[in-house]
Amino acid sequence: MISKILSLIERVAAYLLGKGWSSSTVEKEFSAALSLLKQNKVNLCVDIGGNKGTYTEQIIKKVPACNVVIFEPAETNVELLRRKFSEAPNVKIEQCAVSNEVGDATLYSNEDGSGLASLTQRRLDHFGIDFDNTESIKTIKFEDYWKAELKSQNIDICKIDIEGHELDALAGFGEAIKHVSVIQFEFGGCNIDTRTFFQDFWYFFQEHGFELYRISPIGLIHIPRYRELDEFFSTTNYLAKRK
């Protein structure tokens, strides 16, 4: 009985700290990202791993004049995005995955258009999920796109949600990382499959001049230093703000 009570307290405490607080929080996530911006005007946002467009919907709802670039590799989702934003000239959709190299890759998932889709074939047998659905896709380095298509513009907010490959995408930013004000990224169970750790994110952002925050139901929680307790493998959202 005592162990059950302690487990409940542990879960509640983690939840209040934002650990595992991820479902249906997109509106709060974008609002939190906005709160870290110093300037009032938001000109350019990038949505890496757009899926079905819920994050971009929040962007154009709160800042209608903002230009948005969505990167989404899955054909099913790209078709949906094109329909959803057909009357939004400020939204550009790019059918590719953002990574640390340019080339061809395989997108694995449990079904077409899945929000679980990843460049890694995840092992989700413990959830009863078959991850054998595949799709051939293209990958790009963000730095190349930023220079060629965005003309090296400053980026206000960049959201990265690509199921365990966020670090790969960040590695491909190159010089562009110096021109992003706020980056939102996800960390959780998918990082078990890709063998990446919160420590990797901590040092990446520290070395590139960012400070980290965890998004939680009680507000933003500043993370001034790395702790092993932060290795929490249940979907959690973070913000990195340029110092």
Image (cartoon, grey):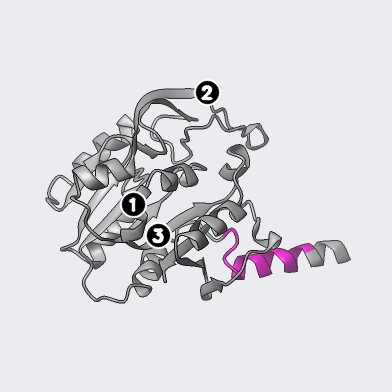
Which residue position is annotated with label 1? 175
Question: Which quarter shows the C terminus?
Answer: bottom left
Q: Are marks 2 and 1 in contact (CB under 8 Å)?
A: no
Q: Earlier in the sequence, mark 1 or mark 3?
A: 1
Q: Is residue 1 visible?
A: no
Q: CA distance from mark 2 to mark 1?
A: 36 Å
Front-lying residue, 213 or 116: 213
Secondary structure at numbered mark 3: strand
- In the picture, measured across the screen, residue 235 lies left or right of residue 44, that is right
State the mark number for residue 183: 3
- Tell me the kind of residue under disc 1: Glu
Crowding near pointer 3: few (<14 within 10 Å), some, many (20+)? many
Q: CA distance from mark 3 to mark 2?
A: 31 Å
Q: CA distance from mark 1 to mark 3?
A: 15 Å
User: x, y (%) of residue 150?
Assistant: 20, 49
State the mark number for residue 132: 2
